[in-house]
Image (cartoon, rainbow, N blue to C red):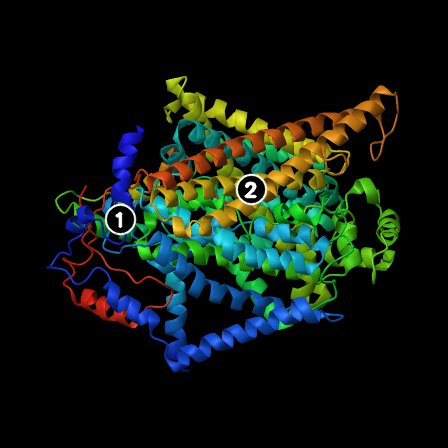
Amino acid sequence: MNAITIRRGLASVGRYVQAVMGDNAYEVYLAHHRSAHPDVPPMPEKEFWRERDDVQDREPQGRCC
Amino acid sequence: MGNDADRSRAKRNRARGNGDPAEAGVLQQDPALPPIAVPDQEREAEERRWTPPKIILWVAIAILGGLAWVMLAVVRGETVNAIWFVFAAVCTYLIAYRFYSKFIERVITRPDDRRATPAEYLANGKDYVPTDRRVLFGHHFAAIAGAGPLVGPVLAAQMGYLPGTLWIIVGVILAGAVQDYLVLFFSTRRGGRSLGQMARDQLGRVGGVAAIIATLVIMVIIVAILALVVVNALGESPWGVFSVSMTIPIALFMGVYLRFLRPGKITEISIIGFILLLAAIIGGGMVADTAWGAAVFTLDRTTIAWGIIIYGFIAAILPVWLLLAPRDYLSTFMKIGTILMLALAIILVRPEITVPAFSEFAGNPAGGPVVPGSLFPFLFVTIACGALSGFHALIASGTTPKLLEKERQSRFIGYGGMLMESFVAIMALVAAISIDRGLYFAMNISAANTLGTVEGAVAYVNSLGLTGVNLTPELLEETARNVGEESVVSRTGGAPTLAVGLAHIMQQLIGGTALMSFWYHFAIMFEALFILTAVDAGTRVARFMLQDSIGNIFPKFKDASWTLGAWICTAIMVAAWGAILIMGVTDPLGGINTLFPLFGIANQLLAAIALAVCLAIVADRGQFKYLWVVALPLAFATAVTVTASLYKIFSPVPAVGYWAQHNAFKEALAAGEETFGTATSREAMEAVVRNTFVQGTLSILFVVLTVIVIAVAVYRTIRAFSNGGGINTEDPAVASRIFGASGLITTKPEKRIQKLWDALPADKRREKSRH
């Protein structure tokens, strides 16, 4: 168990937490967009995040007890 | 759909084992791609291969689990160590997951990874996204778990530790996790359709409408009672009121940060928000110590209830980005953290439990003083979340299927996710029973009996004649002082008891009694956070459903951008749960003890509806030999909820039956009495008459709606049986073009295939269907 393994472990925990929280949503969208509509420019990042929140206004999602 | 059409399709359904000939053509593997699934033969060979280390591992798990159950259920010494609860639960979950859920997969769901999931064939990069299974597990868990599994087990601890433990563990493996798994899988096969839509497709118009009305009413009840738990935790607690109120400005700040300053930095702002939250908790202690702080933030329960109602309305009409989304992030972040903390604390501290396996109330037909009613059925409705929670069906249909990468992963997400929630419930139970039993009852018996005073509580609890319980005023005063509260008497609702239990365990690990008040308010804070998120989201979802339903008569309501319509529907929903909340807060009989059974009944009735839909689907698939997998939990949930409802409607014991209580108070009023039971005035008596009328009416409504849904499902099942199958409501099969491992651990064949995919040029990998 050296410092590098620990750092690598922590980094992957960090990446996992970020993925669960949704930090990578824009990257996911870009990856999808590139393969599905390569000829259309993707939504700019700021607009993407706004749209992502605003869609919940129209289609609310439940949270359980 | 006519019967003839049903029958001609039925033929096809019966043939539909692992390969409908029509589907086989569609599901051809693209030869240009590496395998999109592990070939069935290879997978089965891998599953059946029992190597010596594997055998030793499973034998060890079985022995450890068996030993733990012997310690809990048979030996039952003077004290029992909390670690046995952890072993019994974890080992049983592992065995159930490995063997029972695998069995369900083999005989009922029969996932086919050659089929694309809606996340793949409808992929849009936003709400339909094939998501890594471990990440999706986190998402799904954060969506299903909240305050429910933290509250129910605490209240059920009045019966002793064993009934609750047995129901949480056995219930989840045979009922709760089965429901979540099946609903998730069936919804995935149907383009991610919601439970309501599936009910309409499967059960026809009457069953579908009944299911939707039931869902709506149940949502109102659940939001109201969760809000009541918060109100009870914050009443007369300046510290709690201050720190929980601070979550609003913190969330607003987070919202603005994410919208304008650094969009997308969700984890970053959640960490900042978490630190601010800790500051709010510490600050709350300081504020509550000042004279002005105590004066401003000491609020009675009715005021807090009105505060939550007004807040709930505003939160539901504000844009999501400003309040709901950031608080949801904070809540998710806290969920992961606190559950890890709870598990670590219990494993490291390993408290000794002195609560008996079965308490004096377990055999009492009137039940205990915390929640009235006999063990069967009321224990099974007191603990809903963590054992069987119908609410999950709303998440498992609709939300999660849109993110599910491969069909075969639904077992890990659906069944596994629910096991995780059950584990949270077990930990909550352990935390609650690790505190002194006398203290437990003093905190959980309503002020109607303890009079809300230390003397009253001591006298009442000691008069119960519980063995080994000798409550002293000093203990109550010392506990209150340690957790930084004026009093801990009659802090009903479960949340404060759990907070005391958690503080009690955590202070042994870090900080000693000096930090107890911090841990207590930390626990109150996360419970309030989970609940307020559920209240906001629940109000929005309910409003949306109401808009949709009214929209069938007045089409304008369906237009989501019509602000006035949204406001009217929000106001109706808030008024509905607000009325029940105020009723609970002002109830002369105590509130939580009369209302909590309704919460459990509502949640389990939803589970019965979800299982009824699953039953009809399984029957339509022609899988009659294994129908019992669904029929068993459905029959049990139906027996529990219908019996509990009938007790609530017809029981002659006033503490149990709403109408018996109603009539008793009505007669007392008619006889001109000035006081009756725990009601000390004619106004209070009139309030009881009113409250019991509402509660009794709701009980009748619930049971009628559910019986309709179940009757339709059973009728459809019998019809399917005589036809040898029924209509196929699945969406047409689409061939998958992606690969993903199925379970938590990647198997050898999966690793081999994953390597091929990793070696593929980036432009060919993960090609999603175009739309």
Are there few (<14), some (14-19), or many (20+) residues within 10 Å of tag 1?
Answer: some
Position of residue B215 measured from the top left corner of the image (x, y, whole percent):
49, 34
- Secondary-structure class at tag 2: helix
Position of residue B770 measured from the top left corner of the image (x, y, whole percent):
17, 44
Dot 1 amino acid type: Arg
Q: Is residue B253 left or right of residue B39?
A: right
Position of residue B328 measured from the top left corner of the image (x, y, whole percent):
47, 46
- Residue corresponding to mark 2: B638
Q: Which mark is residue B16?
A: 1
B697, above or below B352, in the image: above
Question: Which sits earlier in the primary sequence, circle 1 or circle 2?
Answer: 1
Determine the chain carrying the residue at label 2: B
- Secondary-structure class at tag 1: loop
Q: Is residue B530 left or right of residue B452?
A: left
Are there few (<14), some (14-19), or many (20+) residues within 10 Å of tag 2?
Answer: many
* Name of the residue lying farthest toward the left: B32
> Looking at the picture, do discs 1 and 2 lie on one chain?
yes
Q: Quadrant of residue B731?
A: top left
Q: Is residue B302 visible?
A: no
* Name of the residue lying farthest toward the top: B554
In front of the other: label 1 or label 2?
Answer: 1
Q: Nearer the viewer, residue B690 or B611?
A: B611
Position of residue A41 measured from the top left corner of the image (x, y, whole percent):
17, 43
Dot 2 amino acid type: Thr
Q: Residue at x 18, y 49 (%)?
A: B21
Q: Residue at x 56, y 49 (%)?
A: B385
Q: Nearer the viewer, residue B525 or B432?
A: B432
Determine the chain carrying the residue at label 1: B
Would you say the residues marked 1 and 2 are in contact, meaning their CB atoms lie under 8 Å apart?
A: no
B594, above or below B330, in the image: above
Q: How many numbered marks have been drawn onto this rendered protein structure?
A: 2
